[in-house]
Amino acid sequence: MPGTTGNSILEITMQLEISNNGASGEAIEEYAAMVAEGRAARATQDGSNWALGDLAQGLPTVYGEETLKRYADDIEVEYQRLVNYRNISKAYEKTVRTVNLSWSHHERIASNPDRLEWMAKAAENKWSVRAMLEQIDAASKVKEFYTLAEWAALTAAQKETAMAQRQASHQFNSQDGDSIDWAKFSWNPVTGCLHGCSYCYARDIAKRYYTELPDPFAPVFRPGRLSGPSNTRVPPQSETDTSYMNVFTCSMADLFGRWVPSEWIQAVLDTVSENAQWNFLFLTKFPIRLQEFHFPDNAWVGATVDAQARIPSVEKAFATVDAAVKWLSCEPMLERLSFSQLDLFDWVVIGGARSSNETPEFRPPREWTTYLENQARAADCHIYEKSNLLERIKEFPGQAETSPLSVPDSFKMGYLQRDVLVPEEYGRE
């Protein structure tokens, strides 16, 4: 009921009675009183986050599962913001909240099991939020990463300890450009890959930023980053734009590569399950392995298809994959693609190739795009065109046409044969 701020409880009750779903008059009156209180709390500055969070916890379920969303609308607060207020209020009972520390102090370490101890230290030492997080990270002595060899050498107890490590300050990376504009965030608890694709942008990025590794693109596990989902707030834009809820998970790796230990994968999936406020988007070039795992409802499970040779193994694998959203990334689309079972998928992303250290920029012919999109429409798939997909036609009379790019040569597509044949030899670890 936008625009009703300041209405009396009686007026609110009457409006609710008109649209209620059979709730008792007593429940409606209680809910109306809480709407009025919520509007009053929203209008104040100090303490409003706590007040709204406390109210959100105690709502009578007048509208069933939709009650919290309806309440957010009734008090004119974004739904995801109200969810965050409620979750933080749950983490701190009224008696343990530190009045001389900010809401942000409480929010940033709400998932930390030792949060009350750290809040006391922050109050005593008058730490800023940043100083508090730095102290927590220093005290936890988190080992930043484990290589495959280091992980294999750990005992079961050591692995359990490593899995529990968290970085209090870690958050998602924001994606402001259009390279992966279907997700506004990326998250990389596992980095590195052994596929060796010629056009890999992630390998180029790793060489710039992961200089602490002898091989910057070697597969490593970064358990401290598992805190990223709980440390990052869902932005209010997610109410109208799904991309603000989407997190490209392991954008710097293939999480389901044949070399990745199952414990690493399961740790990521457990974290996904614990953070239902986000959609986690996965891509793999080794889809046969997907059947080994159970996927939470907020996991969008996908495979990359850059060439025709990948399609049989992808379709075979996804016939047994159980996921809320199954999708394909045909980026870069290096060949004209023909699917037999595109109806297995909910969503198809189509793109070209941006230049890498080893390969040129490439935009596929329009006929390839039209052909694939016609298949997607027939299979009732949603379509997402990347900004690097289509190239303007620029022809002049009397000017010789430029020679077309030789895709197999320019993109060294021989690597595909190794990738496609390996699944036949793959044995679950």
Image (spheres, grey):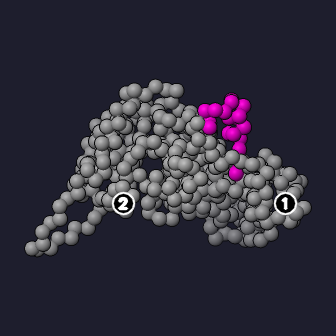
Could you tell me if the residues under marks 1 and 2 are in contact, i.e. CB atoms within 8 Å? no
Main secondary structure along the magenta-highlighted residues? helix
Q: Position of residue 333 (x, y in %)?
A: 31, 51
Secondary structure of the residue carrying tag 2 is loop
Mark 1 / mark 2, whichever is N-terminal: 1
| Residue underneath mark 1 | 122
- Specify whether 326 is left or right of 214: left
Q: Nearer the viewer, residue 138 or 185?
A: 138
Range of magenta residues: 150-167
Residue type, numbered disc 2 = Ser
Q: Nearer the viewer, residue 57 or 180?
A: 180
Q: Gap between marks 1 and 2, in whole Å?
A: 47 Å
- Specify whether 240 is left or right of 67: left
**Residue visible at 51% across and 65% down?**
176
- Label 1 crowd bin: few (<14), some (14–19), many (20+), radius 10 Å: many
Q: Is residue 73 above or below residue 380?
A: below
